[in-house]
Amino acid sequence: MKSPTSNVSERFYRFVDTTLVPRIAWLSDNPFISAVRSGLVLALPLVMMGAFAILIRSFPVQTYQMFMSRTFGPDWVDFATAVFNGTFGIVAIIVVFSIGPYLTEIHNRRKILLHVNPLITGLVSLSSLLVMTEPSGDFFPLRWIGISGLFVAILVGLASSYLFLRLSSVRQLRINLPGSIDSATMKSFNVLLPAILTVLFFTGLSEFVKDTWNTTVHEGVFRLLQSVFSQTGEGLLAGLTYDFALQILWFFGVHGANVLDPITHDVYRAAMDANVLAFINGQPPPHLITKSFFDVYVYMGGSGSSLCLVFSILLFSRQPANKRVAQISVLPGLFNINEIVLFGLPVILNPIMLIPFLLTPVVLTLVSWCAIYLGLAPDPKVYLDWTTPVFLNGYLSTAPDLSGAAGFSRDALGAICLQAFNLVLGIMIYAPFLIVGDKIQASQTKASFRELLLRSVSPSPTEIAGGLLSRSDRAGAFARSLLVDLERAIRTQSDELYLVYQPQVRSSDYKVCGVESLLRWEHPHYGTIAAPITVSLAEESGLIHELGQKILTDACRTRRHWMDQGIFDLTIAVNISARQLTPKLLEQLDETLSRFGLPTRSLEIEVTESTALDTNSSECAFLVQLHKRGLRLAIDDFGMGHSSMKYLKQFPVDVIKIDGALTREVETNDMCVDIISSITRLCRARNITSVVEFVENANQVRILRKNGCDVFQGYYFSRPLDAAECLKFVRSNLVTERGRERTFF
């Protein structure tokens, strides 16, 4: 009998899996939220540089500051400031430019005939933001193109992209250039009027705000937010309200510390000054909640108590990308610099992070207030720089004198214990939301895999559809991440990439006559990656030649080993991408066959028919050269493409592998049987071997054999095997016909 606790736990997890995860995933996949997240992630490298520049400039150790001044001169901080201004200081520009391309790709998939260049959308959004940014003299103020202007940049990026794309869908506004062969010029003129109208709209909006309220859009939004969150007063409830307001602003991309700076200075910094004065006069502190109270006990790692989030990711998240962001964020987080995790996870506009990001500081504020009120921990007595590391600030803030030369007093121990307790409590608050987030990310990863696989097996990319790596959506980001891992696996000769071999048997006697080598990629985090995805990534990135060399080397090494074991009458097939058909392949083939001492007829080169080679291209001429050298040529997936017969006319073919889509339906579709029968008759007339894949049952074998197929390949005979298992399979000669019985393996 299950306990009530286990029943509650089961209901909770069922609710998470069936209700919470799908709804949050749906919200996360909202195109506008995804576009903002994409922009934030794109800005991450510069954000990281800016964050470390802050750390270098503000490292709170006097000895370090003096050393840097002596070594690099008194103006050394200008270097770090310049790095910050050129990176983190322009984050609003980066984000506003990045939002448009993401939304444009969605637009282009939905409206193929009204295609828009994604870069143009980004430029229009950037222009729309800049016309609303009032210059300071001859320059744009860095304040509004950096983190302080991020909120307005997000709003402008979304609104301008939406307006521009809607206007671009109005055919009457598109200017066509008849007879133009310059694609870039044509695309620019197509959206000229929508771009002008969009920028003019935001220019007019800026002027309207200026004339009506005598302020700029940025200043107006800033003042509005200040007025909403400025009526907090003092006391515990006021402190909790301030806490909540700060986090909610940060969550929506607003620099909460800037907006609430008047409250921070006039209320909580003033309260800290009053406490310091009372401490000097030997009086009890008049205020519990001060600026140092938040810095020491609540904002460990920055807004949202981000250090709790970082450690929670390291302890509970199973997503490698999240763990990597957390690892990078640990050092800055110890100094209360949290931009890396805010942008890298990201936290901003991330639905799953909303509750813990708001809740954790509020809970820590309440716990810390109670601990100080009950005398379990001391109130901070010294004002410290906000970059003072966690735990060190707890120690120094309880110093018995203003110099900070504290012994390890009872107060210092109490402060550090409260910090440690709060850190653990914050970690536990974030943990369940990270677990739910992992479920959502796992679901999104599966969706990305499906999208990449669908794109990989589709016909050759068109200019409109683009490839895997050029996509600006989640699938594109995932593809680019996989590419990094693929390059590492290829260049380090990792055992993640390996070959398996599927036997091919003659229909006449069921004897093994060949094997097809098949690529496998066992990713350390994602498991088996579908071969079409691996090949597509290699083709688009230019890694296909290195990957092809590895496949060729491994296949020939295996064939050499089998020959040494007495297996001679066997052909090994290697799949070749159309992009490999260059003189470089000839060099690879000659060198590899020579190195392993293999006769050319032992190797079969397979080219997929669906790659749609131009029959007059240099690739086809190259295939003729391969055949003249004695290599066997095979056309894979024959029968469903648009140029099958042209291939037979253009270059000599030894083997035709009939498209698996035909094989799968031979039991239910007479048309497929007729097509296969026609292909096999053609093969016999041209002395070409016909091979059928995806043979999975005895009835298929009977039909295909009756219709003249020469060689079978499929799970009915054997699944793909590693080299050792395949050798055993071949040597055992288990593929035999015993009357009408078949031996299974």
Image (cartoon, rainbow, N blue to C red):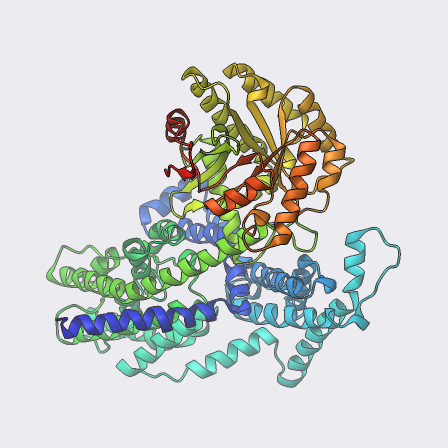
> What count of labels does the image hold?
0
Residue sitting farthest toward the right = 179
Q: Is residue 530 above or below residue 512?
A: below
Q: What percent of the width, then of the height, locates residue 57? A: 42, 51
Determine the residue located farthest toward the front in the rendered image.
Answer: 739
Residue at figure coordinates x 47%, y 71% from the top left: 27
**Percent position (x, y) of residue 234?**
30, 82
Q: Name the foreground residue: 401 vs 333.
A: 333
For residue 497, say whether it is visible.
Answer: yes
In the picture, measured across the screen, residue 508 lies left or right of residue 564, that is right
Residue 134 appears in the figure: no
Figure quadrant of residue 612: top right
Using the image as rendered, state which of residue 447 and residue 622 is in the foreground.
622
Q: Report the residue at 58% width, 56% height from top.
A: 472
In the image shown, does 60 or 588 lie closer to the viewer? 588
**Looking at the picture, how far across and down is residue 535, in whole percent?**
55, 41
Please report the residue visible at 27 percent of the width from the left and 67 percent of the height from the top: 429
In the rendered image, the quadrant that contains the C terminus is top left
The N terminus: image quadrant: bottom left
464 to the left or right of 237: right
Which x, y percent locates residue 622?
A: 71, 28
Tell me if residue 386 comes above or below residue 675 in the rendering.
below
